[in-house]
Image (cartoon, rainbow, N blue to C red):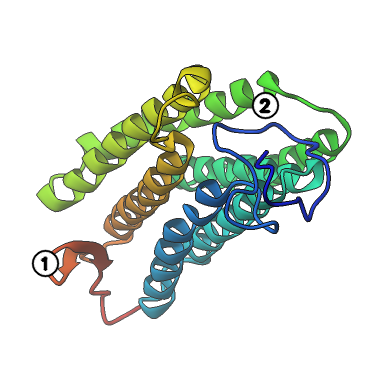
Amino acid sequence: MADTISSFWGPVTSPEWCEKNYVYSSYIAEFFNTVSNIPCLILALIGLVNALRQRFEKRFSVLHISNMVLAIGSMLYHATLQRVQQQGDETPMVWEMLLYIYILYSPDWHYRSTMPTFLFLYGAAFAVAHAIIRFGAGFKVHYAILCLLCIPRMYKYYIHTNDVHAKRLAKLYLTTISLGTVCWLFDRLYCRKISSWYFNPQGHALWHVLMGFNSYFANTFLMFCRAQQLEWNPRVVHFLGLFPYVKVQKPKSQ
């Protein structure tokens, strides 16, 4: 902890990352790890506006909102490094993955009420357990398993999509999650060496930025695939030639 600035939040009660605490403000423990969540918040808001404007199913609005909640939870966690705020970061991470599992698998699920009921109860049970028990490495393994459950379905959507721009979204999703994981591991495994450098590359902050884009690319790709299933004639268009989003043309009967 920096000696020149005192801590507003008191002693640290949650795991710290490879960034010196309270360097820029007594109100923000890990400055870069906090502000690096802003891109995720903005991208999720853009996705939410697009989902509402084109009247996508409510599941996608909830998905974008969950991304925003996760970004806010992560900001509070890294700003305070307190146990309660850590739960406010990690529990939404699990809820978000359960929502991804629902969106990915629900189109082929024959018993419509069974799957959301199970996922809701699972998420509620995890929240209660996580409030009582410190999972530590167990949380990371659990989260990784939930992520891996999504990959086969994402691959199935990818191979059944002929649109070049939609496939590019899937590739960007894979690229950002791969680069983000490398940054996360580098920051975690080599922190002692990084701390002796003149310049800290802020690997965990880069993970936040990359995962913000990763969530946006994943959400946009899933919106395209769902619009295809509903025969809404989706197209991936680019704002200013760079920023991708899905535009649909619904049949007049809808």
User: What amino acid type is highlighted by mark number 2?
Assistant: Phe
Horizontal side of 75 relative to 208 (left or right) equals right
The answer to which of 186 and 110 lies nearer the viewer is 186
Left or right: residue 40 versus residue 170 is right
Which amino acid, by three-letter code, is at mark 1?
Answer: Gly
Q: Nearer the viewer, residue 121 or 9?
A: 9
Q: In which quarter of the image is residue 42?
A: bottom left
Residue under the image location 29 percent in, 35 percent down? 174
Residue 208 position, x and y percent, is: 46, 45
* Residue 74 drawn above or below residue 109: below
Which mark is drawn over residue 241? 1
- Is residue 114 at all visible to an observer of this figure? no
Q: Give me the C-alpha separation between circle 1 and circle 2.
A: 40 Å
Looking at the picture, how far across and down is residue 187, in whole percent? 47, 27
- The residue carrying mark 2 is 139
**In the image, residue 196 lies at what x, y percent?**
47, 23
